[in-house]
Image (cartoon, rainbow, N blue to C red):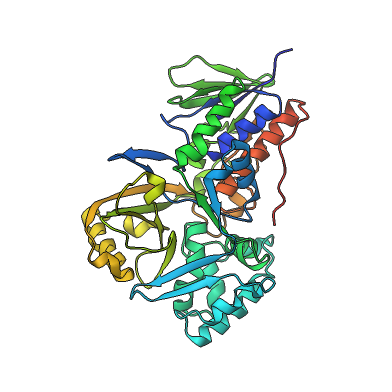
Amino acid sequence: MSEPHVVVAGGGLAGLSAAIACIDGGARVTLLEAKRRLGGATYSFERDGLLVDNGQHVFLRCCTAYQWFIDRLGVADKVTLQSRLEIPVVHRTGKTAWIKSSRLPAPFHLAPSLATFRFLRPLDRVRVAMAAGKLVRLDVSNADSDRKTFGDWLLENGQSPEAIASFWDLFTLPTLNAHSSQASLALAAKVFQTGLLRNRTAGDIGYGLVPLSELHVAPAVKILRAAGAEVRTDSRVVSLAGDGGSIRVFAADEPPIRADTMILAVPHDGAAKLLPSDALPDPAALERLGTSPIVNIHVLYDRKVMEWPFAAGSGGPVQWVFDRTSISGCERGQYLAVSLSGADEFTTVGNSDLRDTFVKALSDMFPAARSASVESFFVTRELNATFFQSPGTAELRPGPVTGVPGLYLAGAWTDTGWPATMEGAVRSGLAAAREALVHLSLTRSPPTFATP
């Protein structure tokens, strides 16, 4: 008897993890990707002899599904993970403060660095600690938590606008791709509870030591092809339909494919256009999820100007900045990448104006940059980087199962219990694969990861 056939549409982390899990479960897989490259929202491209990531992506020690994925790909030696959380926070004046994890038990492990965090007034430090104590106890499963913005909750709990900008948004922006004033309280509480407040080591920061294409795409394709999977790029699915217990998949300019089951792992706006009308109770829900942009500023200097592998910014336009020199293959000087989340204000600003703004901001933060020459400057924009993680989105995020037998959903926008992160994407791929394998009566199930 031939192996059951699974078609996975979408070659991002959700699709790649789903495809590998289906292979591991005993299915035959065809992976279809509309673009000429795999990787989804985490990809690399070549520019002037450098391998450039579209944006900086990090993970935390609590991201157990993503770390499983890295292990399964055989690239655990190509990432690094802090032994303990340490974040240099650099003010626009060049002064530095630190957020560090101590040996105290959670949530008190951050208390020593918070007590000396120079970018908060003493009263704000006390109020931040008090709000954190309330936040760690908040019930994120309560529907009311998703009807309020995190910013409103912070103001109700004594947080000043300065504290929100200098401390809370330091974490809210990169994880939720939205400012606290826009973000769902439930999702923000999930971030802080899981990543910072309930486990002393959960927030340790990890990142790749090689470009994303080498970290994710190349090893995943190697595994899939070694197992006999067919991987097609430039293969855009234009429609699909249930067909007597199977799924018929129609890709542009290609013969239709019959699959025993299908995992649709494309962005939510694309899924909304492809799903049959009976797939979800509210077919228009996905369109209401919206999108939020990320803009990345890439600056190559003729010398080293930042001493750390990454730093957070405070009091200026820089949110987070990363040293990409060795990762990209840059052989001289230093290559810095500034990551701007929730970046609506920057999406239509011209590159020349962005250069003026951010070269000056980096010079203000890092004195060595004032005497350095900028050898290259460019900008990458992901206008639809994530869904807009605002209040009311919990009820719009479907799980992996649809109303069409054999058709399943994956993507960081699905209901994973996590925000739109690499961890959420991998969890969604494994959840969809698990359902697909059960549907096919295959008993080798993907691993499960509890939500911390």
Q: Name the residue rendered at 66%, 60% in the picture.
A: 143
> Residue 77 occupies which quadrant of the picture?
top right
Q: Nearer the viewer, residue 235 or 275?
A: 235
> Residue 186 occupies which quadrant of the picture?
bottom right
From this view, report whether residue 334 is shown above or below residue 216: below
> Can residue 278 be spotted in the picture?
no
Q: Nearer the viewer, residue 424 or 240?
A: 424
User: Going by the image, does 210 lie left or right of 277?
Assistant: left
**Residue reaching furthest bottom?**
123
Residue 54, image x, y percentages: 39, 45
- The total of numbered circles placed on residues is 0
From this view, report whether residue 200 is shown above or below residue 80: below
User: Going by the image, does 347 lie left or right of 355?
Assistant: right
Residue 347, image x, y percentages: 33, 53
**Residue reaching furthest top?**
1
> Can residue 205 be spotted in the picture?
yes
User: Going by the image, does 338 lie left or right of 85?
Assistant: left
Q: Name the residue rendered at 46%, 24% in the picture.
A: 235
Q: Name the residue rendered at 72%, 30% in the picture.
A: 437
**Residue reaching furthest front?**
331
Residue 333, image x, y percentages: 29, 54
Q: Nearer the viewer, residue 286 or 342?
A: 342
Residue 438, image x, y percentages: 75, 31
Question: Which of the image's four quarters has the C terminus?
Answer: bottom right
Question: Which of the image's four quarters has the N terminus?
Answer: top right
